[in-house]
Amino acid sequence: MRATVLEGPRKVQVENVPDAVLPGPEGVIVTVERTAICGSDLHLYHDAPTGAGIRLGHEAIGTVAEAGPHVRSLKPGDRVLVSGVIGCGVCTACLAGQPNVCLADKNAAFGTTLDLPGGQAEAMAVPFADLFALPIPDGVDDEEAVLLTDILPTGYLGALRASIQPGGTVVVVGLGPVGIMALQCASLFGPARILAVDVVPERLARAERLGAEPIDARLAPGALQVLEATGGRGAGSVIEAVGADATILDAVSCAAPGGTISVVGVNLTMDLPFPMALVLLKSLTLRAVFAPIPGTWRFLVPLLQSGRLSGLGETFTHRMGLEQAPEAYELFDSRTDGVLKVLLTPNP
């Protein structure tokens, strides 16, 4: 079968690799129909780890081709979406839909290690499928289903954990795919204002169409503009959706005294120059999360089915075949041509 393989920094190839095999009696093999490139894939793309050869991708939907004998809720022919994050599949955290805090320390994302091949491929193996795969619900279209595998839950948790108050002010720092999901989910909690900070004109325009007040950080520091827009106080809720050192520091700087900062951008540095004095003196709460994808589905699926969250398919600005994955990565990394998110089709 074909899969997208990381060869080195800024180099991916679509290669023939061994076919996916059942990962155990509780697992399934999924024929992948739609998959996407995530911003966190770019962390690997920019700085390929020693283990070149990783099969990329953790956002995928498709059809069950084979199911292990212990799988209860799925059968061949079922169309499913797959959680981008999985765990051991047997601990109480995994059973509760929280593989991010797997008690066996086996939480992992597909397509980030050599031993957990990803979904940017013609097929993928899904362990403990009763927990980590979900039949695509009625009323949820394919592109919404892809978003449910990672970035919609991540954006939702960014908003949920920001302590948004009805009538309050929210800042979203970073308007990539996760930031746009967070912005739309923030509206569910009734804020009066959402300020949206980025440097890409198309992304700022998209946020404005969604009802946010755009702040172009090319013109002046984003945190400074937030303070000016809020009479010097800052925002009670700040969602950081980039993960860069600089944007995390900006998020702290533009939070109001007593405010909450919710970090969902991926930052794996161990030497972040953290502004503890600001956090202490402003009595801030800072939260960060590696998203527990399955635990969000019971909230997000009804919101999609009811239309409370709508138009999310517009997140996908480019659609390409799997064989175009190298070009898709280059495009997504460049942030040109109005790209927000790229959808790949391994099996048309």
Image (cartoon, grey):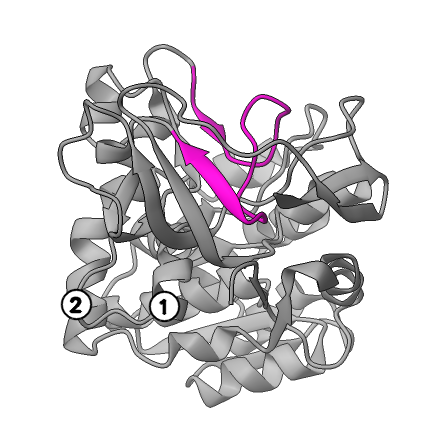
Q: Position of residue 204 (x, y in %)?
A: 61, 80
Q: Can the viewer see residue 89 in this picture?
A: yes
Q: Residues within 10 Å of mark 1 (few under 14, many from 20)?
A: many
Residue 244 visible, this orientation: no
Q: Which mark is residue 138?
A: 2
Residue shown at 40%/54% (left/top)?
Answer: 61
250 is higher (above) or lower (below) than 86 = below
The residue positioned 79% from the left and 64% from the top of the image is 327
**Image quarter (top left, top right, bottom left or bottom right) of the N terminus:** top right
Neighbour class for label 2 at 10 Å: few (<14), some, many (≥20)?
A: few
Q: Amino acid at mark 1?
A: Asp
Q: Could you tell me the amino acid type at mark 2?
A: Asp
Distance from Cα at disc 2 to Cα at disc 1: 11 Å
List x then y, in percent, for residue 177.
54, 64
The residue to which callout 1 is attached is: 142
Q: Where are the magenta residues, as a range? A: 106-126
Q: Is residue 272 magenta?
A: no
Image location (x, y in percent) of residue 153: 35, 52
Q: Residue placed farthest to the top in the image? A: 104
Q: Is residue 113 magenta?
A: yes
